[in-house]
Amino acid sequence: MNTELFISRRLFFDKTNKQFLSQKIIRIALFGIALGFAVMLISVAVVTGFKSEVRNKVIGFGSHIQVVNFNSKNSYELSPISKNQPFLQKLANIEGINKVQAFGTKTGMIKTDEYIQGIVFKGVDNTYNWDFFKKNIIEGRLPQLNDTTRTNEILLSEQVSKLLKLKLNESAVFYFIHENETFPRLRQFDICGIYRTGLEEFDNLFVLGDIKQVRRLNDWKEDEISGFEIEVNDFNDIENIEQQVRNTVVEYREDNNTILRTESITRLYPQIFDWLSILDMNVWVLLILMILVAGFNMISGLLVLILERSSMIGVLKALGSPNWNIRKVFLYLSFFLTGRGLLWGNIIGIGIILIQKTFNIIKLDPTTYYVDVVPMNFSLVHLLLLNIASISITTLMLLIPSYLISKISPDKTIRFD
């Protein structure tokens, strides 16, 4: 039988303890632990949810990995490559790759009677994965693409449509400048759908339509494209998969073929992903501060418990109990009390997360935060790790103040009592 555990359980469940001053102090400590843990849980959910939302939006515009012409500069005017590449079949067989799709881009501008807006016309074919834009389309429908005829339908962002005062099913005049031509080429496109992602710098830029329009504007052949977009199943594997893609592309390159290069989305937009990585540091600082606050709350409660139970400590010492065994009694008791605080912290934190995920009560300005509501990412792994880390670190912090028990003299405490 574990005597120390038995004594600590009796002390924890003893209802007569309510008359002691320590109970009021412990309630305050438990309230601090519960509130601190709820803040930690919500902070992790918000930051991971925010990072996931912004990351997925950037990926929605450019996919995870791109294979383009090596001679292309870091711009949207990419040199053409052939869409009939010998390595495509092997790329499809690489574990972790979900889809390989062709794309083409052409820079230009939209002009109305009052405004001009620079854009990037991104052309895709009928095999393009529209899942991202399906979730973010707010009016109309997606462009209807096919293998035979060229369509004039485009998908425009809400931001650009409001700026240029364009509406659904209206026509817009585009101007495209060719490198060797003095006058721009004019094209008229029909707005079949309007999307909104909240990622303002991308919404202001991208217009989606038929890749055949890009070939026509660039005077490309029927088999020429700007490059390939590669979707992967797990973002965390992007570096490993990119290395495999690079090796495959190099392996199948012949001397007379165009030299290709691969670019991950993290290198295409480093400013966004570097900014997102900084958020991790903020979370770590907050977690450390909250755990320290919880630890010091329990230290104060433990010291009061030891002082109020000094006569009990004296009796146990007189009966021959070693100092470490008595310390274990109070460590077990502190463990139970910390667990109670964490239980309430879990209830409060999970409750707030579920309410926000369900009802989207807290709104944000998408022009500043890239999202219109506070995102919440609830993860059982994060929940378990936070609970284990909190109770472990707090218990370890209590080892030092529990050393006070060894300084208590049994004869003085019993005589005083």
Image (cartoon, rainbow, N blue to C red):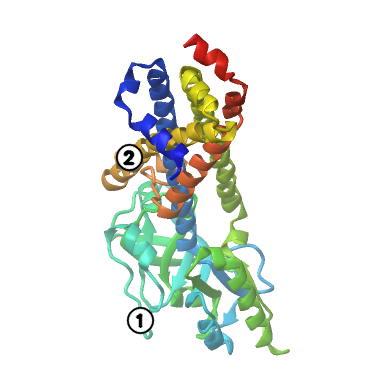
Q: Mark 2 points at which residue?
A: 347
Residue 140 in the image, given as x and y percentages of width and height = 26, 61
Mark 1 element type: loop
The Cα atoms of the two marked residues, 2 and 1, are separated by 52 Å
Residue 264 in the image, given as x and y percentages of width and height = 59, 66
Within the image, what quadrant is residue 409 found in? top right
Point out the tag, 2 or 1, that comes first from the N-terminus: 1
**Residue 146: image tag:** 1
- Residue 385, compared with residue 90, is above or below; it is above
Residue at 57% x, 71% y is 66
Residue 141 in the image, given as x and y percentages of width and height = 28, 65
Residue at 41% x, 31% y is 35
Q: Inspect the image, locate mark 2, and give the three-letter code of the amino acid beneath it.
A: Ile
- Residue 309, compared with residue 118, is above or below; it is above
Within the image, what quadrant is residue 405 found in? top right
- Residue 310, compared with residue 201, is above or below; it is above
Mark 2 element type: helix
